[in-house]
């Protein structure tokens, strides 16, 4: 059933034009919206948006749903002293502990968080080495249950042995046979040549790009130079991954000038994850030498709030990047261009967020970006529409029983934490 948004103010996501007309929202994947010139008749549900702002919903450029049950988990067996030990003692211990039920709970928790923070599309990078076969379908069904569109991949890696790497390749192959998605690779330092070649064969088979962490820490570059005699971007370029416009390079903190020049010549996207980088003490993102049109924003599993990610990129960028209001908003919205240019479904115009923004000052087209940086936050999100369907109404998820899901996620978190204690 179509939805009629009455009496609100629509903010065009690209031009920032303010339009005060009722909006008829078509239901269905990649549906449209239309502005009412006269009274609309027909069957639809009506949502009164008096005094509210309406705009395109948000999207996450790089997420890790598998980390959703980490909040409050037991401390690692020893305190990490560098990035590799953060992975070894925290995240690789957690992902190895995940089974089917924990994976489902992680995806459902992430989907709820995305919905309530206004994100209706997620690009996720999944890992569960002891539950690989069928893991992407579990994520797919969990996201769809809540109403979150997605682009998934499994994090293929040699770090747990070649049998696990092969399973990751097979899971990717099986999933891409019937779903849109990407080919996930962990990072250059855990993916050897044979696995890289297998991933390259998948890119040729499906036309899909890779989704990989790049130079998140300097160790990734050092490893590549020592093992292969080339830097990470040069290595990836040798497999043809950078010739695919749907390829996503997450982080890119420690790439050098020559690597930036290579990336700038390609149509691949780079995803900035400022808060995660700060948390892991691995450095700061800089857009120097890169196309501003092809930088997206992600959360790296820290949370699902893209407004928060955009503001973090702006504030940290004042001393470590060249970024202003306009560039921050461009990075925030570049994901929509990425999805459209590569023909991915689920990010149509009928994905909307309605904000109850109680600003003490006027908001208009000329000063919108100042409000976006210094004013908007998750608490202002009142309603969320995904594929033309209302999934959040009056700040409550209505597409599923939120209470029931949270009971499930908490029970699975307890199971996970017990495993992490052993």
Image (cartoon, rainbow, N blue to C red):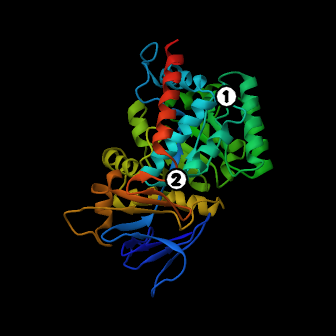
* Badge 1: residue crowd in 10 Å (few <14, some 14–19, many ≥20): many
Q: 346 and 335: which one is in front? A: 346
Q: Residue 281 carries which label?
A: none
Kindly state the secondary structure of the residue where label 2 is placed.
loop
Whether residue 200 is visible: no
Q: In which quarter of the image is residue 16?
A: bottom left
Position of the N terminus by quadrant: bottom right
- Residue at 29%, 72% in the rendered image: 364
Which is closer to the viewer, label 1 or label 2? 2
- Residue at 66%, 49% in the rendered image: 242
User: Do callouts 1 and 2 mark residues in contact (Cβ within 8 Å)?
Assistant: no
Q: 378 and 194: which one is in front? A: 378
Q: Which residue lies furthest to the bottom in this view?
A: 38
Left or right of 406? Residue 152 is right
Residue designated by label 2: 399
Q: In which quarter of the image is residue 78?
A: top left
Residue 103, how many percent across, how many down? Answer: 59, 33
- Is residue 421 positioned above or below 388 on the image? above
Left or right of 280? Residue 350 is right
- Is residue 109 positioned above or below 389 on the image? above
Residue 122, how many percent across, how many down? Answer: 54, 49
Residue designated by label 1: 131
Residue 59, how many percent across, how many down? Answer: 50, 54
- Residue at 65%, 42% in the rendered image: 153
Q: Quadrant of residue 324?
A: bottom left
Q: 146 and 345: which one is in front? A: 146
- Is residue 348 positioned above or below 87 on the image? below
First-in-chain label (1 vs 2)? 1
Q: How far apart are marks 1 and 2 (CA)?
A: 28 Å
């Amino acid at each position: 059933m179509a939805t009629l948004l009455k009496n609100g103010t629509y903010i065009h996501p690209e031009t920032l034009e303010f339009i005060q007309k009722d909006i008829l929202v078509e239901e269905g994947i990649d549906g449209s919206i239309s502005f009412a010139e006269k009274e609309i008749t027909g069957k639809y549900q009506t949502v009164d948006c008096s005094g509210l702002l309406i705009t395109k919903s948000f999207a996450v450029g790089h997420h890790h749903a598998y980390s959703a049950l980490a909040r409050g988990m037991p401390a690692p067996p020893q305190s990490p002293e560098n990035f590799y030990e953060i992975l070894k003692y925290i995240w690789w211990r957690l992902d190895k502990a995940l089974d089917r039920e924990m994976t489902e709970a992680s995806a459902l928790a992430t989907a709820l968080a995305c919905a309530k923070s206004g994100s209706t599309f997620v690009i996720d990078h999944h890992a569960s080495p002891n539950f690989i076969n069928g893991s992407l379908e579990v994520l797919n069904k969990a996201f769809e249950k809540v109403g979150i569109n997605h682009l998934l991949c499994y994090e293929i890696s040699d770090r747990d042995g070649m049998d696990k790497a092969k399973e990751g390749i097979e899971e990717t192959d099986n999933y891409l046979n019937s779903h849109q998605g990407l080919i996930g690779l962990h990072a250059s330092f855990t993916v050897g040549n044979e696995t890289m070649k297998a991933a390259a064969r998948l890119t040729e088979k499906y036309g899909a790009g890779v989704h990989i962490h790049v130079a998140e820490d300097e160790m990734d570059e050092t490893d590549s130079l020592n093992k292969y005699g080339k830097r990470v971007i040069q290595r990836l370029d040798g497999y043809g991954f950078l010739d695919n416009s749907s390829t996503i390079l997450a982080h890119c903190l420690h790439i050098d000038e020559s690597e930036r020049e290579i990336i700038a010549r390609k149509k691949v996207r780079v995803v900035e994850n400022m808060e995660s980088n700060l948390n892991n003490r691995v450095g700061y993102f800089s857009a120097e030498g890169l196309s501003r049109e092809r930088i997206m924003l992600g959360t790296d599993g820290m949370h699902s709030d893209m407004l928060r990610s955009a503001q973090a990129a702006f504030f940290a960028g004042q001393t470590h990047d060249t970024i202003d209001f306009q560039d921050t908003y461009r990075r925030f919205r570049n994901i929509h261009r990425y999805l459209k240019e590569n023909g991915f479904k689920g990010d149509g115009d009928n994905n909307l967020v309605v904000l109850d923004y109680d600003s003490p000052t006027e908001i208009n087209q000329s000063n919108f970006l100042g409000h976006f940086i210094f004013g908007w936050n998750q608490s202002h999100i009142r309603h969320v529409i995904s594929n033309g369907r209302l999934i959040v109404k009056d700040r409550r998820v209505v597409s599923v029983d939120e209470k029931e899901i949270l009971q499930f996620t908490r029970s699975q978190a307890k199971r996970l934490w017990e495993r992490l204690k052993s």
